[in-house]
Amino acid sequence: MPFRIIRNDITKVEADAVVNAANSSLLGGGGVDGAIHRAAGPELLEECRTLGGCETGQAKITKGYNMPCRYIIHTVGPVWQGGGSGEKGLLYSCYEKSLQLAKEYNCESVAFPLISSGVYGYPKDKALQVAVSAITEFLSENDMDITMVVFDKNAVLVSENILDNVRKYIDDNYVEEHSDNAGRSTFVAGFSMIYEKMPEDVCCAPARFSFDKLDESFSQALLRLIDEKGMTDVQVYKKANIDRRLFSKIRSDVNYKPKKQTAVAFAIALELDIPETQDLLEKAGYTLSNSIKFDVIIKYFIENRNYNIYEINETLFSFDQSLIGV
């Protein structure tokens, strides 16, 4: 799971390193900084006193003490002053320097808060854009599990224009499926009720079947598509936000059946259209349905040829749906 967004208390997240949105003194403060100092215990403050503070955009590392992590990486984000005082570059540097330290200390997993988005006033949507940009750049050259930890979904704000368009698309296409007492499927779309019933003259006898006629597997289809698109394995699994080890399992096991979110992530990475996506998903036993909100959101992005997996995941997060590629 190279990059994911979760709602949690960062002091309870297990990772090799947890990033602290600190102030320049490194001696504790409010918000995330205060919570981490309280959770780690007084020994953290003792070590921080020896570090001589930290400049904005830089990072320093300490032990994790009572936190469920080996290290705490302290970075000082910029105070928002309207965007014209180099805040973006300084915030980018916070993530960049923190990840460099994590790599230097052989960390395989890192948990970040949304730096500067609290009392420092950095607009959450802009702060998230910088975070995703820095993390994406790092993951293009490195393997590491990175988690963005937020308290609630309102901390993750994608473009209001995208959210409005997705809401409208859902309203126009989402069909909620129920089951009535007769065992038939009931679909609710606006005020329409559509009943589907198996015709009484359908023969239920088992059909003759030959295993020689089996279609290609998901793994075979995926590898074929990678070749057809002229992409490398690395390009695809990184663009899909898929862990290298998971991709290796899929490549080595012709009968590997992925989770639906994983299969969708590969379709996004390969920039498939709707029919191509449906075909790839069918190899793993799935489909895109208008009765599943997750599927409708995915269809919106594919139909609009927006294959930015991070933007898709931010939108899924906003609608309380499972993320793809993680």
Image: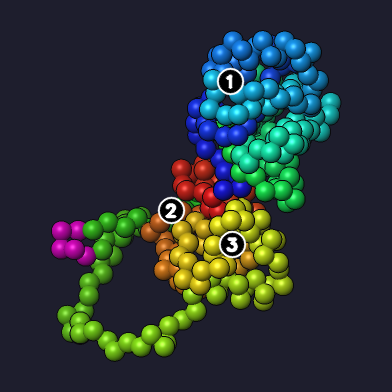
Q: Position of residue 271 (x, y in %)?
A: 63, 65
Q: With 198 as the anchor, is 40 left or right in this view? A: right
- Residue drawn at x 22%, y 75% is 198
**Would you say the residues marked 1 and 3 are in contact, meaning their CB atoms lie under 8 Å apart?**
no
Q: With 283 as the anchor, is 189 left or right in this view? A: left
- The residue closer to the viewer here, 50 or 140, is 50
Q: CA distance from mark 1 to mark 3?
A: 35 Å
Q: Say what secondary structure mark 3 lies in.
A: helix
Task: Look at mark 3 in the image and give the residue it sits on.
Answer: 248
Q: CA distance from mark 2 to mark 1?
A: 42 Å
Q: With 192 as the anchor, is 33 left or right in this view? A: right
**Would you say the residues marked 3 and 2 are in contact, meaning their CB atoms lie under 8 Å apart?**
no
Of circles 2 and 1, the one toward us is 1
Q: With 292 as the anchor, is 325 left or right in this view? A: right
Q: Position of residue 307 (x, y in %)?
A: 64, 58
Q: Which residues are magenta?
A: 180-184
- The residue closer to the viewer here, 64 or 303, is 64
- What amino acid type is highlighted by mark number 2? Lys
Dot 2, crowdedness within 10 Å: few (<14), some or many (≥20)? many
Task: Look at mark 2 in the image and give the residue it sits on.
Answer: 293
The prevailing secondary structure element of the residues shown in magenta is loop
- The residue closer to the viewer here, 104 or 123, is 104
Task: Look at mark 1 in the image and give the residue it sits on.
Answer: 65
